[in-house]
Amino acid sequence: MAVASLPSFNLTLKSSPLSFGFDIGRSKHIVGSSYAKFASLKKNRDGGLQISVCKAASSSSPLFFRDLDADDFRHPLDKQNTLLLRAIPGLNEIGKALLGSIAEQVMVLENIGTSVLVSENQLSELHQLMIQAAEALKIEAPDLYVRQSPVPNAYTLAINGKKPFVVVHTSLIELLSRKELQAVLAHELGHLKCDHGVWLTVANILTLGAYTIPGIGGIIAERLEEQLFRWLRAAELTCDRAALLVVQDPKVVISVLMKLAGGCPSLADQLNVDAFLEQARSYDKASASPVGWYIRNAQTRQLSHPLPVLRAREIDEWSRSQDYKSLMKRAITKNSLQEV
C-alpha cells in the first residue's frame, strides 16, 4: 500500500487511509515502495522538460471488454476476505466517522498542489495509456498526476464524493517500458473497479482508532490489522489480474514484479522474466517443508502486498487458466466496440 505523505497537520496516520498502490508492500513497521520505469526526462529546445516515452507497445489492436464485471477477474482470496470484512458489524459507518473531512482535504491538496495533472495537452501519451486501460476495464478514467519524487511509487486516492485520482512518481517513470507502466495504471484501476477503496479506508482508519480504546483497543486493532493485511494481499492479486487483462501479456506484468524485486534503470535490459519465474518456483520448493512454511507465513503475515515472486507465480498460473482464456474470448477490438 503506497503512502501519501501528509504536510504539517498533526494527522498521525500510519499510512494514507485512502491510498492503495502498486508496490512490494509494507510491514507493520516498514513502508515499502514500488519500482517502475516508463520514460526518460530531457530538455526540449525551449529549455523545458519533456518526457520521452519508451515505445514497447504491441503492434496489434488493443482488446476491450463490452460487459466486464469485477467478479469476472476477482481473486478467490479477495472474495473470501471481503466477506470476512463485511461480517464485522458497523465497520463501514465507524470508519467513515473516524476519517472526517479534514484528513481528506489534506491528502487531496497535498497531491494536487505538488503534482502535474496529465491531460490531452499535458503528457498526452501518459493520458492515452490511462484512457486505454480504463476503456478496457469498463471504468471511468480517474485523473492522473505525475509527482516529482526520488521514491518510486504509484498510488490511488479515492475520496468520498470526489473523483478518484492516480499519482505516479517520476522515479517510477524511470524504470518501466510503456506497456509495463500501463500495467501499473491498470493495476490501480483494478482497485477502483473492485471498490477496494471503501474497505481500505474503513479498515485502516478503524485500526488506527482502535488503538485509542482503553484496555482492549490494542488487542482489537492487532487482530483487525492482521485481517486487513490478509485482505490487502488478496486484493493485490486481483489487481494484478486487472493489469493482465489490459496489457494481455503475462510477461509484461511479471516484468514489473521482477523490477519491483530488484530492478534499476541500468539493469533493466538485462533482466529475464523466465529466470524470475524459475526463482518463484524455487521459493515454493524452499518453503514446502514445515520450517519453510512457518518462515514463509512469518514473512508475509504483516505485509500489505504478497511477495513479488508469489505474485509472479500467481499471474503466470492465472494466464494459463481456463477462466482467463474464457475472459479473453469475450474480448473484442476497439473497432468492433465502436461498430456495436
Image (tube, rainbow, N blue to C red):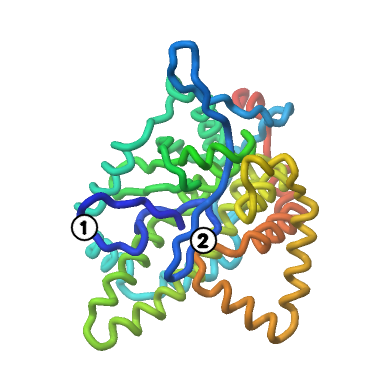
| Residue 191 position in % (x across, y down) | 48, 51
- How many callouts does the rendering have? 2
Instruction: Give the residue drawn at x 37%, y 43%.
Output: 164
Give 25 or 185, whichever is nearer the viewer: 25
| Residue 8 position in % (x across, y down) | 21, 52
Few, some or many C-alpha atoms within 10 Å of disc 2 (few <14, some 14-19, many ≥20)?
many
Tell me the quarter of the picture where residue 208 sits.
bottom left
Q: Is residue 238 visible?
A: yes
Left or right of 259 in this view: 227? left
Instruction: Give the residue drawn at x 69%, y 44%.
Output: 267
Instruction: Give the residue drawn at x 61%, y 46%.
Output: 243
Q: CA distance from mark 1 to mark 2?
A: 26 Å
- In the rendered image, the residue lying farthest to the top is 45
Where 110 sits versus 236, above or below?
A: above
Q: Is residue 144 visible?
A: no
Pointer 1 residue: 100
Instruction: Give the residue drawn at x 34%, y 64%.
Output: 14
Give 307 or 150, whichever is nearer the viewer: 150
Q: Give the SS element for disc 2.
A: loop
Q: Give the SS element for disc 1.
A: helix
Pointer 2 residue: 25
| Residue 150 position in % (x across, y down) | 46, 44
Left or right of 151 in this view: 264? right
Query: Type of residue at label 2?
Result: Gly
Q: Which mark is residue 66?
A: none
Q: Earlier in the sequence, mark 1 or mark 2?
A: 2
Query: Type of residue at label 1?
Result: Gly
